[in-house]
Image (cartoon, rainbow, N blue to C red):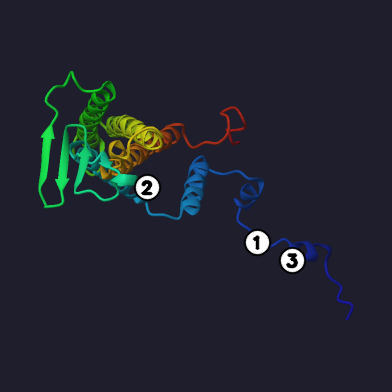
Amino acid sequence: QTGERPAEWGRDQQTEERPAEWGDQQTGERPAEWGETSRLGRDQQSEGRPADWGETSRVRGDQQSFFLGLLGLLGTLVATVMPYWRTSAHVGSNIVTAVASMRGLWMECVYQSTGVFQCETYNSLLALPADLQASRALMVLSLVLSVLAIAVATLGMQCTVCLEGAGAAAKGRAAGTGGALFATAGFLSLIPVSWTTHEVVQTFYQPGLPSSMKFELGESLYLGLASSLVSLLGGALLCTSFCQEGDRGHRRGAGGYPYPVGMGGGVG
């Protein structure tokens, strides 16, 4: 009943039958490709996304940024052409009037209560005030840069086949250049809009000025401000997309082994 057992019985039962290579796995000896496979598994687990998720996300981001820049261009064009930068203020003795006047960068218009709308362009360029000439130049330059930004950004967008032979780096640089041009165009159009707004507000609150000579902010100023901000946003998003793509490419080219070469790379 005491069950006399040989001395080696307990050792044999405790040590189960194991393959010869079990000891190698316990000691941590792993094949050379184990590190790359493990790193790939960690990347897939951490991301949890399909392989083309990053590419699809960048394409959508490029398209959104491009359409924001295009929308800013259209708004800036309308604000530049329309004469509603300054509208006559109906305050004080001028609260009831049969004539409303509007002034823009290129023309001055008058609307009468009878329904007649007349516009007259500025005849002499040199006779215009210096701030008006500068506003013209900045708005036109902003439009030119926006058109150039559209052309350059189209070459760098992932949804186009342009510059395919030059590689992804060339397309990324083109997209980044287009974003910088969009941002510059938005900043240039923001300068005359902000300056005109400041001048209109300062003149409106000037105490010695008659009410008939006071103006209010026109619709073109609001449209120009919104268009400038949209262009700045679109350009910033394009530049951000380019910087992120460059950072991802740098990490991919840096290699996946996380340790220095001399730290125990050799096995056996």
Q: Residue furthest bottom?
A: 1
The answer to which image quadrant residue 204 occupies is top left
Q: Circle 2 sits in a helix, a strand or a loop, which is it? A: helix
Q: Measured from the top left, where is residue 128 in percent x and y? A: 21, 23
Q: Residue at x 74, y 66 (%)?
A: 13
Query: Looking at the image, is mark 3 or mark 2 nearer the viewer?
Result: 2
Real-space Cα distance between discs 1 and 2? 48 Å
Q: Residue at x 48, y 48 (%)?
A: 43
Say above or below: 81 vs 37: above
The answer to which image quadrant residue 162 occupies is top left
Q: Which residue is mark 1?
A: 17
Q: Residue at x 56, y 28 (%)?
A: 261
Q: Circle 3 sits in a helix, a strand or a loop, which is it? A: helix
Q: Residue at x 19, y 40 (%)?
A: 82
Nearer to the camera, 152 or 208: 208
Residues at circles 3 and 2 in contact by the CB criterion of under 8 Å:
no
Q: Which residue is mark 3?
A: 13
Say above or below: 98 vs 210: below
Nearer to the camera, 39 or 232: 232
Residues at circles 1 and 3 in contact by the CB criterion of under 8 Å:
no
Q: Which residue is mark 2?
A: 54
Horizontally, is 54 left or right of 100 in the view?
right
The amino acid marked with disc number 1 is Glu
